[in-house]
Image: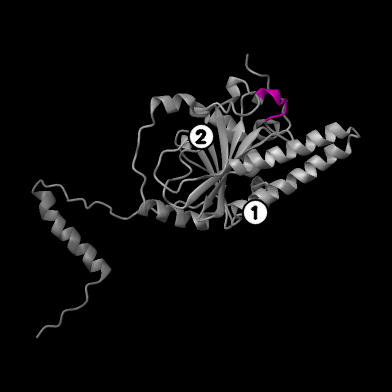
Amino acid sequence: MHRLRPLTFAAALGLAAAVAAPAASAGHRPVRVADTRKPAPKRAMPVSAEHRKALAKLGGGFKFGMTRDEVIAVFSKQLDERYDDKIKATTDIAAQDRLRRDKRNEVNRLQQSYVSFEDAKPSPWDVSIVDAEFAHNTGEAMLERWENQGGQNQRRFFFFFEGKLWKMFLSLDVSILSEDKKTFPAFRSVMEAKYGAGDVEDGRITWRSDAFDVRAVDKLKSYDALALVIEDPKVRRGVDAAREAHPTPPHETNAVIKAVIDVDHTDHPDPKANSGAVDAVIQANGGKRPKSSP
């Protein structure tokens, strides 16, 4: 009895050539087998310790995992520090009372902005700059505030999942920029100068770390704005699972509702009134402040 010897790699290669030769001589082309291997996952752009620290500041003193009441409490404390200086700067009793009233109004406004997306019922936020940032009937909720201090003029949205803060969305005002500066390449140049190189895809720059992910998003065409989003990547997995389990059926927003939704943020003072609105965000480092568009 003849024993079969193992087929070596070299022998296998020779056998394949021998089998292919008759087919080729007969005028037939070799059959090509499609490559079914999946492409290697794209490696995230590394973030340096310096840029990670700069990105973390986008949290504005708020931490993932905070409840709604804790977010409001931190906000109130931040106001105390800001308003105390203003109150101490004047001896006018009436002016001091007005400042204290303004502070209470700011806290009340943040409290009243709370919205829960516990059911599938349409919300005005379904057609807004944050419409892609939440879903209905998945344990999600939101607070919203306007930040107009320290040269800023932006809106901060706090997103909660199962009662805990997991994401913040910052809508940056670019209304004072000239039209030639309102481009994604210009935005990318400034963002990467400040935060380092990120993963760029479809009008979005992403920086990833173990503690948080940050997205810079182009909203210029739809809302004349640019946005920065900081979120907890660990919670993101739970959010995605909840959304898959409870998909929100698509619905067409009534034209009347579309007409009255605050797409231009007119519920806040005119963004152009703040001369330093986006200097710290969109101007190139060391560059001069761009002239406003006519």
Q: In the rendering, which numbered label is found on residue 127? A: none
Q: What residue is pinned by disc 1?
A: 70
Q: Which residues are magenta?
A: 272-277
Q: Nearer the viewer, mark 1 or mark 2?
A: 1
Report the amino acid beneath label 2. Answer: Ile
At mark 1, the secondary structure is helix
Q: Position of residue 161 (x, y in %)?
A: 51, 53
Q: Which residue shows up at 46% across the image and 40% down it?
A: 132
User: Dot 1, crowdedness within 10 Å: few (<14), some or many (≥20)?
Assistant: some
Residue 206 visible from this viewpoint: yes
Q: Establish if 260 lies above or below 125.
A: above
Horizontal side of 148 relative to 249 (left or right) equals right
The quadrant in which residue 152 appears is: top right
Please tell me how crowded label 2 is: few (under 14), some (14-19), or many (20+) other residues with Cα within 10 Å: many
Circle 2 — which element? loop
Q: Which mark is residue 129?
A: 2
Report the predominant secondary structure element of the magenta stretch: loop
Name the spot of residue 94 as percent of width and height, x first: 85, 32
As drawn, 177 above or below 159: above
Q: Quadrant of residue 174?
A: top right
Relative placement, left or right, of 248 versus 87 is: left
Going by the picture, which residue comes out furthest to the right? Answer: 91
Q: Residue at x 11, y 47 (%)?
A: 28
Question: Measured from the top left, where is residue 112 in percent x and y?
Answer: 59, 41
